[in-house]
Image (cartoon, helix red, strand yellow):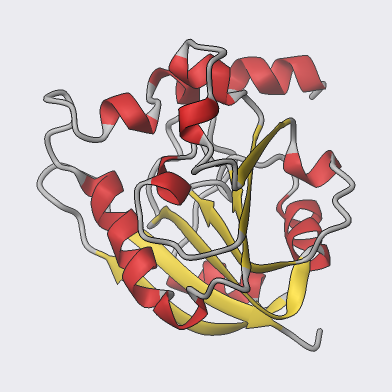
Amino acid sequence: MNELEYYEMQQPNLLYPNERYINSVENKNKADLYRMQFVFDDMQDVNKAENKMLDIGCNDGFFMRHFDWKFSNYLGVDMFSISDYLKTSDIGKYTKQGKIEYLTGIFEKMELKEKFDFIFAGEIVEHVIDVDVFLKAVDSVLGENGHVCLTTPNNIGAHLPEHFRQYDKITLKDKLSQYFEVEKLVELPAINDSWPFLYARCKKGNV
């Protein structure tokens, strides 16, 4: 699969910019917001001003902006630009007073030099072409005492063309354990008509 085909396959993601969708009437179950709140609550031990956050597949940056993160710097990476999501080139008010930088492109193809204390990838591992390449890239920018958190649908979603794989608790833990020390892996239950999701919290491993 070439890069153009991959971008075309992932186009459905552009339909749901978080800023507009999460609190809309169309979004009846608010499951996205529930998952974000769960991650925020679980990561309070790393929510410190001296730390740095990376949000992979950041969409329009909602998760970095709408929660009381205290980090000094934020980097949001997405294959589509924040301007594509929000239909505006005026993104100043979406940068958390200049603390958030946005990069557009495929994360695992970027050569980032910076290390991060907290890395979040929400509903990303099911979309990437090569999950091993992706997880190696995550590990390469994770700080020595850093944490990475991922969410993904729990054994559902294979019918969607933009999904390349699906996980259950066992297969997700097996894969993540190849690169990280898995501290927690739990199911986030379905809310109303939403899907059940998995949440994994990991730290730098010795693998």
Q: What is the x, y in percent for residue 147?
A: 60, 75
The answer to whether any part of residue 26 appears in the image is yes
Can residue 60 be seen by looking at this rendering?
Answer: no
Q: Tell me the residue at 34%/30% (across/down).
A: 19
Residue at position x 54%, y 68% in the image: 171
Q: In the picture shown, does residue 54 fall above or below 10? A: below
Front in this rendered view, residue 159 or 15: 15
Q: Quadrant of residue 57?
A: top right
User: Residue 203: x percent and y percent?
Assistant: 63, 81
Please state the horizontal and vertical placement of residue 157, each as a whole percent of the image. 40, 41
> Which residue is more in the foreground, 53 or 131?
53
Residue 124 lies, in percent from the top left, at 56, 46
**Picture layout, residue 168 above or below residue 98:** below
Q: Would residue 111 appear left or right of 62 to someone viewing this image? A: right
Residue at the location (47% across, 49% down)?
Answer: 64
State which quarter of the image contains the C terminus.
Answer: bottom right
Residue 198 vertical placement versus 16 (above, below): below
Taking depth in this image into account, of 10 and 44 the one nearest to the observer is 44
Image quarter of residue 202: bottom right
Q: Residue shown at 74%/69% (left/top)?
A: 142
Quadrant position of the N terminus in the picture: top right
